[in-house]
Amino acid sequence: MQSNNSDVDVSPIVIPPEDGSVKRFFPKLKTKFSIRNTFAALKYPNYRLWFWGQMISLFGSWMQSTALAYFVFELTHSPAFLGYVGFASGIPAWLFTFYAGVAADRYPRRKIIVYTQIGMMTIAVILALLTFTNVIQPWHIIILAFFSGIANAFDAPARHAFVNELVDKEDLVNGIALNSTMFNTATAVGPALGGIIYAIFGPGWCFTLNAISFLAVLINLFQMKLKPVELNHNGNSVLTDVKEAFEYLRTEKAIFSVLLITSMLSFFGMGLVTLFPAWAVKILHGDSTTNGFLQSARGAGAVLFALIIATINRYIVRGKYLGYSVASLPVLLFLFSFNRSLFISLFLLVLIGGMIITQYNLSNGLIQTIVEEKFRGRVISFYTFTFFALYPLGSLWIGMIAEHFGIPTAVIVNAAILFLFYMLIKIYSPKLSSLA
């Protein structure tokens, strides 16, 4: 679809070549720039309901996440235990994510999201009650993290694929970018609020406010008027559907390369976030408020870069900028590892947060643009698997290195691995930079 005479759609065009195979190419990018593209998806009523409901809920989620990490460190004084909690939340991703992808193709995605949001709200209520009654123990947090991981495993594929039901195809990438904007706006503000509320009122109130915040997204989900979506009712077993998706992924080299990038980012790039509470206390000699500011700085950078991507995504070769972000992140992590100033830490975290969200945003956009509709839920489950399954393993990895060799050393090791990966991806996936 063309928005004006000078615009050309960048959706992939499928053409049947003479050999009978199916190939994709991307036509010329749009050449007329418009700042209105930044918030294009908000013209859809359903997307507006989704955006504001999720925004409120995510504020609560980040308040809880920040408070819980610091609470765990207060209870245990162990960087390794921070990794254990992250690992516990990631185990369900290994067990259920691919099944969740099949479910997102077979069942109404709104219904799946409603159930998962209610589950996460219940976990927040239990966490608050255990904290207020002073009976909470570290093992309670491990168990609740595991159940939270189950909810996330089913929520993520349905939530990412759900955007396709809220906007038209030409605004799909913008909707994805605005999803990241709302997520990271909450990341920028929620942790700082969580740190302040933690310091004044204690962690229990952070957990309580998170439980209340889920009502916003639940109410808005029930107000949406959605068009019918064709669901996958082929009668296959779950295993057959998953195998079919793996075969599809094997033929889609571009999607496979992008998933490899998000896998490395989740395992080695996101590990720094796990260490924020320990970094705030042991390196910067701060407290829960310092931890909240570190989280918020990363979120502020993510918001800034997500808005930039939402604005310019129609005018850039996304594969090229994805490569730039893959190269920049290890350099920034290396610089951060030698820094001992709060001001410089916050500045670097703005840039680090920007590079992280650039990789996730561009990766998600490329995948959702290329993927065939009947595989959308399952392929998105592979994408969410790279985060929910590999990020906890990365948390365990960096937590153990920090415990035995020091926190800065752990960051240096991850930065070195990411830089080596960038060199390999340049050699073995040279066509990645040409993906529009």
Image (spheres, rainbow, N blue to C red):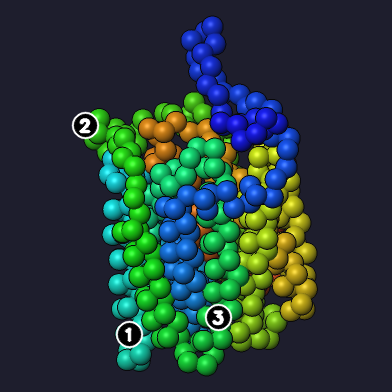
Of pointers 2 and 1, the one earlier in the residue sequence: 1
Q: Position of residue 184 (x, y in %)?
A: 58, 63
Q: Give the residue type that dot 1 points to.
A: Leu
User: Dot 2 surroundings within 10 Å: few (below 14), some, or many (20 or more)?
Assistant: few
User: In what quadrant of the picture does the C terminus appear?
Assistant: top right
Inter-mark Cα distance, 1 to 3: 22 Å
Of pointers 2 and 3, the one earlier in the residue sequence: 3
Q: Give the residue type that dot 2 points to.
A: Gly
Vertical position of residue 206 compared to residue 268: above or below: below
Assess whether mark 3 and mark 2 are in contact (beta carbons under 8 angstroms): no
Inter-mark Cα distance, 2 to 3: 48 Å
Q: Position of residue 16 (x, y in %)?
A: 51, 13
Secondary structure type for disc 3 = helix
Vertical position of residue 263 compared to residue 410: above or below: above
Relative to 7, 55 lies left or right = left
Q: Which residue is mark 3?
A: 193
Secondary structure type for disc 1 = helix
Q: Which residue is at 68% across, 60% downward?
A: 304
Relative to 317, 65 lies left or right = left
Q: Nearer the viewer, residue 321 or 38?
A: 38
Question: Does residue 431 appear in this view?
Answer: no
Of pointers 1 and 3, the one earlier in the residue sequence: 1
Q: Which residue is mark 1?
A: 130
Q: Which residue is at 74% across, 67% downward?
A: 348
Q: Give the residue type that dot 3 points to.
A: Leu
Q: Which mark is residue 235?
A: 2
Q: Position of residue 274 (x, y in %)?
A: 56, 68
